[in-house]
Image (cartoon, rainbow, N blue to C red):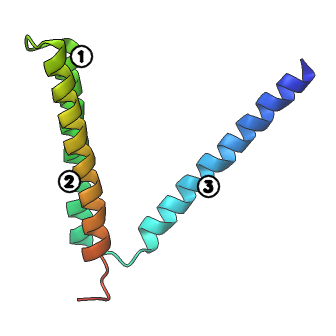
């Protein structure tokens, strides 16, 4: 029992350290990047829209608001997930390419 409790405490501490480190690194990078505000705003809008449309589609499919067969539900879920993922990746690539204020 003592070994198991020690292991759980160690994993919990490690998880807290990792999460705090990831959050600190992300916030530091976002605040200290040479990023034009309009590019950052456009990227955030695209990502929020992509996640919102994906969540809305998941809601429609989970609640069975339309009379869809299992095959149609799989196709719509796959398509909405692909479109949302493509939009997020495209927004991040757009931010990297257009976001640097030093280059014209």
Mark 1 Cα shell of 10 Å, populated few (<14), some (14-19), many (≥20)? few
Q: Residue at x 48, y 61 (%)?
A: 27
The x and y percentages for residue 10 are 79, 37
Q: Are marks 2 and 3 in contact (CB under 8 Å)?
A: no
Nearest the viewer among 80 and 37 is 80
The x and y percentages for residue 56 are 19, 29
Circle 1 residue: 62
Tag 1, which secondary structure? helix
Q: CA distance from mark 1 to mark 3?
A: 35 Å
Q: How many marks?
A: 3
Dot placed on the residue nearer the N-terminal end, 1 or 3:
3
- In the figure, 102 relative to 3: above or below? below
> The N terminus appears in which quarter of the rendering?
top right
Farthest residue, direction left = 67
Dot placed on the residue nearer the N-terminal end, 2 or 3:
3
Circle 2 residue: 46
Mark 3 Cα shell of 10 Å, populated few (<14), some (14-19), many (≥20)? few
Is 76 positioned to the left or the right of 25 in the image? left
Indicate which label's residue lies in the foreground, 1 or 3. Answer: 1
Mark 2 Cα shell of 10 Å, populated few (<14), some (14-19), many (≥20)? some
Q: Residue at x 29, y 65 (%)?
A: 93
Tag 3, which secondary structure? helix
Indicate which label's residue lies in the foreground, 1 or 2. Answer: 1
> The C terminus appears in which quarter of the rendering?
bottom left
- In the figure, 56 relative to 45: above or below? above
Q: Residue at x 30, y 61 (%)?
A: 92
Q: Residue at x 19, y 13 (%)?
A: 70
Circle 3 residue: 21
The x and y percentages for residue 53 are 18, 37
């Amino acid at each position: 029992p003592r070994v198991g409790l020690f292991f759980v405490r160690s994993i919990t501490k490690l998880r807290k350290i990792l999460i705090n480190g990831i959050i600190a690194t992300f916030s530091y990078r976002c605040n200290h990047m040479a990023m034009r505000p309009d590019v950052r705003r456009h990227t955030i809008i695209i990502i929020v829209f992509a996640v919102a449309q994906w969540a809305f589609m998941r809601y429609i499919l989970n609640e069975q608001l339309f009379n869809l067969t299992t095959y149609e539900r799989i196709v719509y879920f796959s398509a909405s997930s692909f479109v949302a993922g493509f939009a997020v990746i495209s927004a991040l690539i757009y931010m990297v390419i257009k976001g640097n204020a030093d280059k014209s």
